[in-house]
Image (cartoon, rainbow, N blue to C red):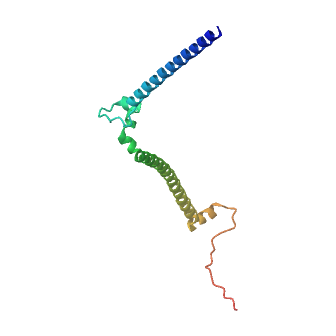
Amino acid sequence: MDKKDDIQLEIADVVEEEKATAEMDSIKEQTKKTLRKIKENAKEEDPKFSSTMNLRTILGGDFLTAQMVRHHIGIIVLIVVFAIVYVAFRYQCQQDMIAIDKMEKELLDAKYKALSSNSTLTEKCRESHVLDALKNNKDSLLHVSDQPPYIINVPE
């Protein structure tokens, strides 16, 4: 009975090996089929750029995969950078112009104030105005001289 059991065990081992080999073969076949399908579906060429461009293709990003856009991405980025710099410089220039206008108005106001002050001072410093102020002020000891001025000669 020992031989019979040994033979049965060997037969069982051979059957299991055949089943395992069959499973491996089926797995290999499935892998080959899957690889074939992937190779069929995977193309290395870019999809053609369709002439029907609508909002959905733009928002979906489909037109960014177009060959034309991908080849020119460097210049597109450069143009965007220049646009941002242009807008920033224009904004800064407008801010500077506003500040210059404000300062020019302040300068004009200061000039008018100085001119007005200078005019008032000149008016008050005139001889007739000073004489009238001296006459109106009775407490003042200052008065207009009755004698004409004369030159004092000092010998050296």
Query: Residue 104 appears at what percent x and percent y?
Result: 50, 55
Residue positioned 44% across, 25% down in the render: 34
87 over 125 or under it: above or below: above
**What is the total number of numbered labels drawn onto the structure image?**
0
**Image quadrant in which you'd find residue 145:** bottom right
Query: Residue 127 appears at what percent x and percent y?
Result: 57, 68
62 over 113 or under it: above or below: above
114 over 145 or under it: above or below: above
| Front in this rendered view, residue 25 or 41 | 25
Query: Residue 150 appears at what percent x and percent y?
Result: 63, 83
| Front in this rendered view, residue 133 or 154 | 154
The residue lying furthest to the top in this view is 1
**Image quadrant in which you'd find residue 11:** top right
| Front in this rendered view, residue 35 or 105 | 35
Q: Is residue 31 left or right of residue 66?
A: right
Position of the C terminus by quadrant: bottom right
Position of the N terminus by quadrant: top right
Q: Is residue 9 left or right of residue 65?
A: right
Residue positioned 46% across, 46% down in the render: 84
Q: Is residue 112 left or right of residue 51?
A: right
42 over 17 or under it: above or below: below
**Image quadrant in which you'd find residue 122:** bottom right
